Image: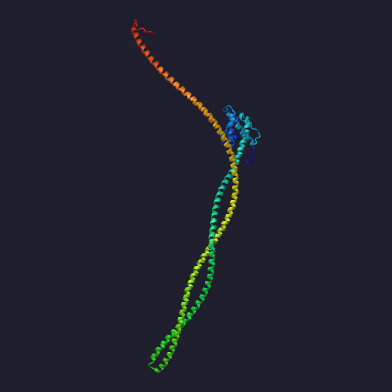
Amino acid sequence: MSSFDYPILSRSDIISILAESQIAAVTDNDFKNIKPDFVSNLYTCLLIYLDALNEEDQGQVEFSALEQIENPDLLIGSFQVMNLYSRLRDVMASLNCPMQFNLRDLIKPDPRRTEHFLSGILNFCLYKETKLNLLRPIVEELALLDDQRKEWEAKISQLNAEIAGYSEARERELPLIQEVESKVKELREMIAGLNSNQMSLRTSFRNLKERTGQMDEKISKAEFDLVQSVQENANLRSKIVQSPDKLQRALEEKKLARDEAKNAERSAIQSFQEKTATVEVYSKALKKMSKHFALMQAIHEQVNSAKSVEKECKGLKAKLSDDVVLDKSLEAKLIEREGKVGQLEEHKRQLQKERDLKFEESTKHLNSVKSEVLSKRCELEARQKKVEDVVAEVDSITIKTSMVRESGAAKVQQLISKCEEIVKQFQQSSSSIGLLLPVDGNGTKTTFD
């Protein structure tokens, strides 16, 4: 049923619904031979099933009402009937029953009217059960949403803590990053200056190499001339014996040539020394250039490390932006969850109100039960005193009867002993009398009848 209606159920439907709902086990004969006790028990089971009546509320009356009645024990059944009647009348009024429920329907029930009222209550039970079945998945979903909300809140708090840690780390590393960036700029300027210096040194080194090549060629040529002059000198010495005049002239020519060769040799040696000095200068410059190159490599490595740090910084910034986007999405989900939490809290307040109302009703019922228990306890104490007095009287009577029984047993024992003595005396007297009796002609003694 989508909405509560009021169809009249047949007797078989009523019996099957009561059996399926495990409210009560009834038969067709119970409706044919309907009795007030059966109707009262059936209505009570239905009210308990609907939570309109607790099992402890049956027949409970306030203590102030009991004080106004002389013999409340005789009216317990009437109290139960009236309590059940008032609850059933309220239930029928809330169900908008077309027929009015009266006290005669409990005391002298009519099968047709009873089936009509049972149809109304069972229809409401079916309607309530369908509504509860529809609301059950919603309640389970709310429980799941509450669990998810708690998980998201935990994740959000964790992400907020991570974001706070990242922001603190960024603030701590910001001056270091600025210092590294300034060093990177300085190193880039230094690299540009060193590159220009390196280019100038390379051009000067090429020029020096060309000059050293030229000097080597001149030195090799001077050495070749010196070898030729030595050979010529040897030839002149061999010719001295043959022509001394020619030899003298030739020797003078050779001396002149030798002087020229020596002068050329000196100039070559000077140029060689100059070249060696320039080579030493170039070697020193090469060492300095190698040192500068090593420094440049170290600077290049520092630049690479600075670039890696910059890349890491960019990655951290990208991750931070992703965390900010995730934070915004989580904040949107948190707002949505907070709305659902507000609805759940409102539902919780309603449930708390209902719980408070039920608690007040239960406290009132508990107070009434306590007052009734106190009154019954007083009655039980009075009855217990009466019972104790009666038990004391019974004990005294039993003591008296035991004493009388013991005295009677002693008297009976005395009488039995006296009877035994009398029997013995009678037997003795009868034996003595038998000896004195005359004997008949037949040989028998006469006896006294």
Question: In the orientation shown, which residue stands out farthest toward the top?
Answer: 441
Q: Taking the image as drawn, is residue 329 in sight?
A: yes
Residue at the (56%, 32%) spot, across then down: 372
Near-viewer residue (70 or 35): 70
Color scheme of the displayed model: rainbow
| Relative to 298, 32 lies left or right | right
Which part of the image, by quadrant, shows the C terminus?
top left
Pinpoint residue 32: horizontal percent, then vertical percent: 60, 30
Pinpoint residue 124: horizontal percent, then vertical percent: 62, 37
Tell how many labels.
0
Pinpoint residue 350: horizontal percent, then vertical percent: 60, 42
The part of the image, by quadrant, that contains residue 171 is bottom right
Determine whether 315 is above or below 136 in the image. Answer: below
Pinpoint residue 389: horizontal percent, then vertical percent: 49, 25
Determine whether 166 is above or below 85 in the image. Answer: below
Q: Taking the image as drawn, is residue 220 in sight?
A: no
Determine whether 68 is above or below 203 in the image. Answer: above
Near-viewer residue (38 or 380): 380
Which part of the image, by quadrant, shows the N terminus?
top right
The part of the image, by quadrant, that contains residue 99 is top right
Near-viewer residue (80 or 385): 385
Residue at the (54%, 58%) spot, across then down: 168
